[in-house]
Image (spheres, rainbow, N blue to C red):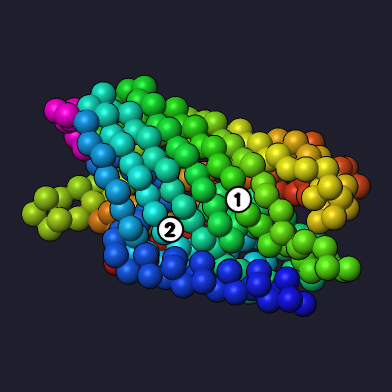
């Protein structure tokens, strides 16, 4: 009980810090490149972020995410590198299968009590209305799973990665009304790695320590402020008799204040 109380206190403190940081900046998920012409010089930004991000999945869960910190470097060649810290809290669990609720957090690209992510966007082509990049995402998330008996730790770490192709297009842009509409898509392969022990305790050995699959992401962004993202993912090497090989969809709505 004492250890549990300490862990809960640390989590409350962390959420408080995330909330404080969220009052100071702006946020987004997959990075959109708004520049039409090539940059004349490199740029580096540190952002403390103010945002509201709601996510709903086909596993009947609803969650809220804060993007707490972003470090971003943009090169004049059109490439960019970023490091981001997210914090996600599940606010509604509609699935009666506890393991699937934990699986939902694992499959959420920005999920986890704490999620640190390093992203690389390497420019392939660019013109006035569209561009394409190779996208690489690597990260680690701390996941709070279902309660375990005998004072066992109820959390574990998941290492994850995505590799894919990003296509972005400007659908509409009007400088007079300061309005814009962008579309993007990001098909990718995905990997998740964790310990055999955590797979046994939280997924009944129905998910391999090294799991792989595919993802398809697409979205719209209006006025660089409202972003709607739809993601579909599937693990291909999950245990055939388990429930972790199903296709999982997620709708994410992010609003930048």
Quarter of the image where one finds residue 52: bottom left
Question: Callout 1 environment at 10 Å: few (<14), some (14 to 19), or many (20+)?
Answer: many
Using the image as rendered, state which of residue 22 and residue 224 is in the foreground: 22
Judged left or right of residue 236, residue 135 is left
- Camera-side residue: 130 or 154? 154
Q: Position of residue 173 (x, y in %)?
A: 20, 47
Which residue is at the far left?
176
Camera sees residue 126: yes
Find the distance from the CA under tag 1 to the CA under tag 2.
Answer: 13 Å
* Quadrant in the picture for residue 149: bottom right
Q: Bounds of the magenta span?
A: 35-41
Viewed as shown, does residue 80 lie left or right of 230? left
First in sequence: mark 1 vs mark 2 = 2
Task: Please tell me whether residue 40 belongs to the stretch shown in magenta.
Answer: yes
Tell me the chief SS of the magenta region: loop
What is the number of the mark on residue 141? 1
Residue lying at 56% horizontally and 57% vertically, measured from the top left = 114
Mark number displayed over residue 67: 2
Q: In this orientation, which residue lies closer to the viewer: 76 or 123?
A: 76
Q: Secondary structure at mark 1?
A: strand
């Amino acid at each position: 009980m004492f250890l549990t109380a300490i862990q809960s206190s640390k989590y409350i403190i962390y959420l408080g810090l995330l909330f404080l940081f969220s009052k100071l900046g702006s946020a987004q998920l997959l990075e959109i490149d708004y520049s039409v012409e090539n940059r004349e010089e490199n740029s580096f930004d540190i952002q403390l972020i103010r945002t509201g991000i709601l996510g709903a999945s086909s596993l009947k869960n609803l969650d809220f995410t804060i993007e707490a910190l972003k470090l971003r470097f943009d090169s004049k060649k059109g490439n960019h590198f970023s490091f981001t810290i997210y914090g996600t809290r599940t606010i509604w669990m509609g699935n009666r299968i506890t393991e699937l609720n934990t699986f939902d957090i694992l499959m959420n690209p920005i999920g986890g009590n704490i999620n640190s992510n390093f992203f690389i966007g390497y420019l392939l082509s660019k013109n006035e209305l569209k561009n394409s990049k190779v996208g690489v995402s690597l990260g680690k998330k701390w996941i709070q799973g279902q309660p375990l008996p005998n004072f066992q730790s109820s959390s574990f770490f998941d290492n994850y990665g995505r590799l894919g192709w990003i296509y972005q297009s400007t659908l509409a842009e009007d400088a007079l009304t300061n309005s814009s509409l962008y579309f993007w898509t990001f098909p990718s392969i995905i990997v998740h790695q964790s310990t055999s022990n955590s797979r046994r305790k939280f997924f009944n050995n129905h998910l391999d320590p090294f799991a792989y699959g595919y993802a398809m992401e697409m979205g719209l962004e209006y006025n660089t402020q409202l972003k709607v993202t739809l993601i579909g993912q599937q693990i291909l090497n999950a245990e055939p008799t388990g429930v972790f090989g199903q296709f999982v969809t997620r709708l994410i709505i992010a609003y930048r204040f």
